[in-house]
Amino acid sequence: DGGITQSPKYLFRKEGQNVTLSCEQNLNHDAMYWYRQDPGQGLRLIYYSQIVNDFQKGDIAEGYSVSREKKESFPLTVTSAQKNPTAFYLCASESREGAWSNQPQHFGDGTRLSIL
Amino acid sequence: GDSVTQMEGPVTLSEEAFLTINCTYTATGYPSLFWYVQYPGEGLQLLLKATKADDKGSNKGFEATYRKETTSFHLEKGSVQVSDSAVYFCALGNPGNNRKLIWGLGTSLAVNP
């Protein structure tokens, strides 16, 4: 079955540590997104990538980094500069074929990051 | 800039009750509107969408009509079930936003048997 796989499901970070969240998709989608979800704040866009080897900052990119070396993969690194990283992180992908408005975003099941 | 406003939750209903979750938007041009649903512990999935004024999106008994005159896209279901308990997100997509979706804050729905 095609879909998006996020791992791990739960992740714990120590102070001063960088951690990387994995996102892999086999939907052959060009565009991929990372969101942060906090209670009562909806989804906030961290980074997005519309094509391999290119990505743009979203609304809350500070303290995060990404790479897009392969179409299937869009890992997110939460750096030690992110002072409040505890949240639920969601990865999504989207096809670029056809009229954009007809292409939904497909989501993984998320990674919950906590501070030790 | 573009924005989406959803009614605050949580919403608590009894099984078979009628559901309305309000969503209004501000946007330039001709946006598309979406409802996504998030079940506990999962990611989001598209529930329904509408791409132009007066379009009605529908899926799994849920409906929403794109009303340009009132800038609204309210979600409705005639008879909710316990399995509908989830968080519902209204979202707006505008070609001028480079394919980025604008999200509402989400409305939590709990349906009691």
Image: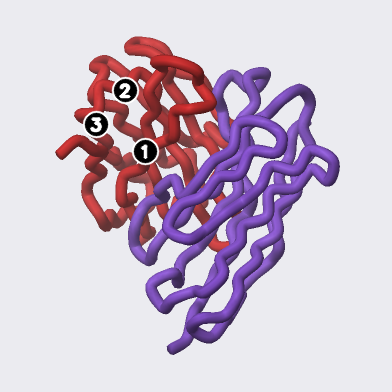
1 or 2: tag closer to the N-terminus: 2
For label 2, count other residues whose C-alpha is less than 10 Å away and answer few (under 14), some (14-19) or many (20+).
some
B61 relative position to B1: left or right: left
Palette colour of chain B? purple
Secondary structure at numbered mark 1? strand
Q: Along the line of sight, which residue is nearer the eye, B26 or B18?
A: B18
- Is the C-beta separation of discs 1 and 2 under 8 Å? yes
Q: Residue at x 74, y 33 (%)?
A: B2
Q: Amino acid at mark 1?
A: His
Mark 2 = which residue? A29
Mark 1 = which residue? A106
For the C terminus of chain A, the image quarter is bottom left
A99 relative position to B10: left or right: left
Circle on res. A25? 3
- Is the C-beta separation of discs 3 and 2 under 8 Å? yes
Callouts 3 and 2 in the same chain: yes
